[in-house]
Amino acid sequence: MTGEGVQSSALDGVETFSGVQNPHWHRIRSHFGVEGFGVNAWTATEAGQTLIPEHDEVGASAAGHEELYVIIKGHARFSVDGRELDAPAGTLVFVRDPALKRTAIAEEEGTTVLVVGGRPGEPFAVSAWERNSEFLRFFDSGEYERAIELLRERHREEPESAGVLYNLACAEALAGRPEDALEHLARSVELDADFRGFAQTDSDLDAVRGDPRFPAAV
Amino acid sequence: MSDAPYVVSRLDELERLSVDDEGLTWRPVRRHFGIQAFGVNAYTAGEAGARVVEEHRDGHEELYFVVSGKARFRLGDDELNVEAGTFVFVRPDALRGAVASAAGTTILAMGARAGEIFQPSGWEESFAAHGYLRAGDEERGRKLLTDFATAHADDWIAHYKLGVFESVAGRKDAALEHLIRAVALEPQAAEHAATDPDLAALREQPGFASAVAGQTQAGGEGT
């Protein structure tokens, strides 16, 4: 339903980016045009999948949000600040401290987590990672050259964004451009050391993993 | 309210506060966690036909998610039946409200004003106070609103809400005292007091009209 000032939709009707071997990202904020706070959801496509990648909210591309995770379906296992937390449907996990590392693994297929966020004391602004994630629609369709085109444009606008460089490297690796991928991956890790860790298990980078220039795990 | 760096709770464990005569049961999520960046609350219906979203207009844009059960929303002039798993997004000022179509229906409501720093809504204190009053813990409710009025000494709404609380609690002299203070701070408080259903018993008191209306005049209107 869409009326004056009103929209409704089932979760399945919200625009979703799937990716390969990744949880489905339901783009709730952008779907409805929410501007007062951040809100998104993720659904696991298989048990054992990383539903919320480990992150904090103080990195270069983070928004400094306090975040409320609501497990609306299935069963997840969270880790916050190194502490394991069992989180079946109906659990609320609120992370106030933006410096705390948090992650979640799906215990069963279909597990869905709703995430609401904002930065206290500031009007809501769309976070950099969300602004920079439009390229994912081309990962879903396998149109890697179009993803590269979009990410290069973002890179020109934000040349020091490690996240943009990392995703550009992924797209280039998938598109069969190993030299470009390795160059951008190295620059990404140089700007934000967290991306060295992400690269170790990211299947998007498999095509360049065997190269001696690939960033080694610490 | 917690200030811990992180908090984990089950929705089932959150307080259930009955806050009106239509069956609205408030689950104060934001207050429970001490969230400061956005509004978030849940409402659970004990039975079909109970209210799960108060009918109101709001300066917040609000996103409702039906966690369980089903509900019938009123959205402006339209009605919409929704099942669990549905989102309903309402922009500021549009009329919204919902009634449960099944027992146990729970709705999560998230909200904030776009482009503004989030401030917790004043109604939360009032909801909590009346919830405690209905649950038989009158003193806890009174303390909540008294502390709020003390912290916001120049806010007429804080004094008005304390006056309403005292009226509902049957303490008419105390209610009048706080309403007079509210009208002294803001003459339009008298207009609200003239029609507020929670003040019906108080309006029958001989001193009500002269006390509250008299303050209106003292506040600069009608002279």
Image: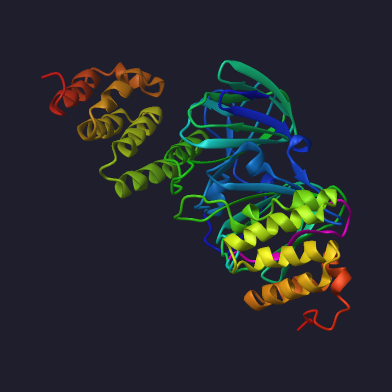
Q: Is residue A39 left or right of residue B152?
A: right
Residue A136 makes an appearance in the image = yes
For residue B80, what is the image quadrant? top right
Which percent across, then down, holds residue B96? 56, 25
Q: Report if residue B179 lies within the magenta region.
A: no
* A135 relative to A57, above or below: above
Q: Residue B181 falls in which quadrant of the image?
A: top left
Q: Which residue is most to the left?
A: B223
Relative placement, left or right, of A84 versus B21 is right
Q: Check the picture and name the quadrant holding the C terminus of chain B.
A: top left
Left/right of residue A198 with respect to residue A203 in the rendered view: left
Q: Which residues are magenta?
A: A44-57
A62 to the left or right of B185? right
Counting labels gives: 0
Residue A127, image x and y in percent? 58, 55
Residue B17 seen anywhere in this rendered image of the structure: no
Q: Nearer the viewer, residue B25 or B140?
A: B25
Q: Residue at x 58, y 60 (%)?
A: A157
Q: Position of residue B159 (x, y in %)?
A: 30, 37
Residue at (53% x, 51% y) in the render: A125
Q: Nearer the viewer, residue A39 or B70?
A: A39
